[in-house]
Amino acid sequence: MRIPRTRPVDERALQPLRPTHPVWFLATVGVRPDRQGRGLGRVVLEPGPADADAGGVPCFLETSLAANPAFYRRLGFEVVGEVDLPCGGPRTWAMRRAVRDTPDGRVGPL
């Protein structure tokens, strides 16, 4: 899968949607279309939010595939904004996941 480079003009368009407080900014995750629907994306993604919860920090991500917000909502993320990137770029959704209690009931650093 080819991951497109972010252009400075895209960064400027996304900046208003990005948090100004500490967050875990989750990087790009992709699953080949013929492998989707098997839980692979969830397995790859879940350690990030779990570690963020243990550290008491929310998570943030951006996605430009229209089907992805529904997937991320199932993992506890909420859309906080969306923008059509300039120069014919894709619509991009900014999503945030609040800190959750850790399995032992604590929130924040262990």
Image (cartoon, grey):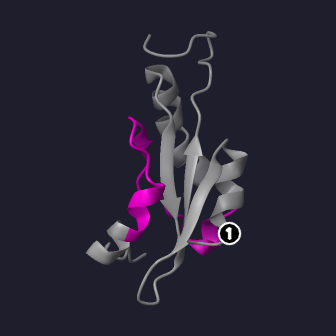
Quadrant of the snapshot with the N terminus: bottom left
Quadrant of the snapshot with the C terminus: top left
Q: Residue at x 58, y 59 (%)?
A: 81
Label 1 crowd (10 A; few <14 / some 14-19 / many >=20): few
Establish if 107 lies above or below 69.
above
Q: Which residues are magenta?
A: 13-37
The rendered magenta stretch, by its main secondary structure, is classed as loop
Q: Is residue 30 magenta?
A: yes
The residue labelled by disc 1 is 67
95 or 35, which is in the foreground?
95
Residue 5, given in percent of the width and then of the height, sits at 31, 74
Q: Residue at x 57, y 52 (%)?
A: 95
Residue 98, given in percent of the width and then of the height, sits at 59, 34
Q: Residue at x 62, y 19 (%)?
A: 101
Establish if 26 lies above or below 8.
above
Residue 4, given in percent of the width and then of the height, sits at 36, 77
Establish if 45 lies above or below 31.
above
Q: Residue furthest left?
A: 8
Q: As shown in the figure, which amino acid type bears the numbered disc 1?
A: Ala
Q: Is residue 99 visible?
A: yes
40 or 82, which is in the foreground?
82
Residue 11 appears left or right of 71: left
Q: Is residue 28 visible?
A: no
Residue 3 appears left or right of 92: left
Q: Give SS at disc 1.
A: loop
Q: Is residue 98 magenta?
A: no
